[in-house]
Image (cartoon, rainbow, N blue to C red):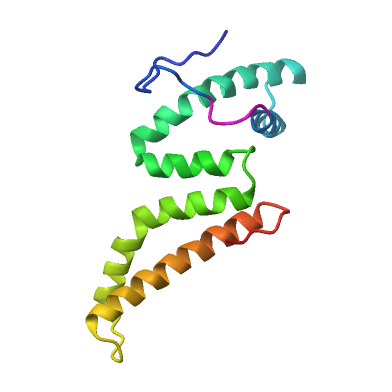
Amino acid sequence: IFFRSTSCAMADGDCKPLLSVSQVDRVVAKVNNSMNIPFMSESSEASLIRQAVDTLNGAMEPSLLAIMPPDYVEIIKLCLNEKLSANEKLPLISALFKKNLRDPLAAALNERVDIPVLPESMEEWFLEKAVEEMIDEGVEHTLQRFTDEPVSD
């Protein structure tokens, strides 16, 4: 073993891989195709790269948690989850974005945009609803772009 994780920062001490086996395979192949270690066979390179990627994979979640809020890590995990369909991911990812973005974004927009035909209380409701629908549209569009299956809420 050439690589090892120095510690697992997960509360339960269990570092679970973030990427699936097939995702790791694709990462290893892409890295291996982009580099050449002199005097080393392709299979030896791939083996070395796999060890490194496997080590990184186990350290990804605690490392992501060290630099971003847990909900954003959960969004990444949902995006990488190969067991859920895009339609199953859509409401889960949208809910996490709404929880973290809707109210602060609607408040920021309310400071910058005035809709003269609406009283302030209705304007606030409108902005929250519009932002919520924009988040849904963004998540749906993104999931649709990366899958062959139709995505809808």
Residue 25 horizontal/vertical position (percent):
69, 28
Residue 8 lies, with reference to residue 143, above or below; the image says above
Q: Which residue is at 68% across, 16% downward?
A: 47
Q: In this view, does 36 lie to the left or right of 8?
A: right
**Quadrant of residue 27 within the rendered picture:** top right
Q: Is residue 41 visible?
A: no
**Quadrant of residue 68 within the rendered picture:** top left
Residue 149 lies, with reference to residue 32, above or below; the image says below
Residue 6 horizontal/vertical position (percent):
41, 14
**Region rendered in magenta:** 17-21
Work out whether residue 116 or residue 122 is closer to the camera in this orientation and state it.
Answer: 122
Q: Which residue is at 69% across, 33% downward?
A: 26
User: Which secondary structure class fits the magenta region best?
Assistant: loop
Work out whether residue 59 or residue 87 is closer to the camera in this orientation and state it.
Answer: 87
Residue 63 horizontal/vertical position (percent):
40, 30
Residue 50 lies, with reference to residue 105, above or below; the image says above
Q: Which residue is at 41% across, 73% downward?
A: 130
Q: In this view, does 68 lie to the left or right of 59?
A: left
Queried whether the magenta region covers residue 96, the answer comes back as: no
Residue 40 horizontal/vertical position (percent):
72, 15
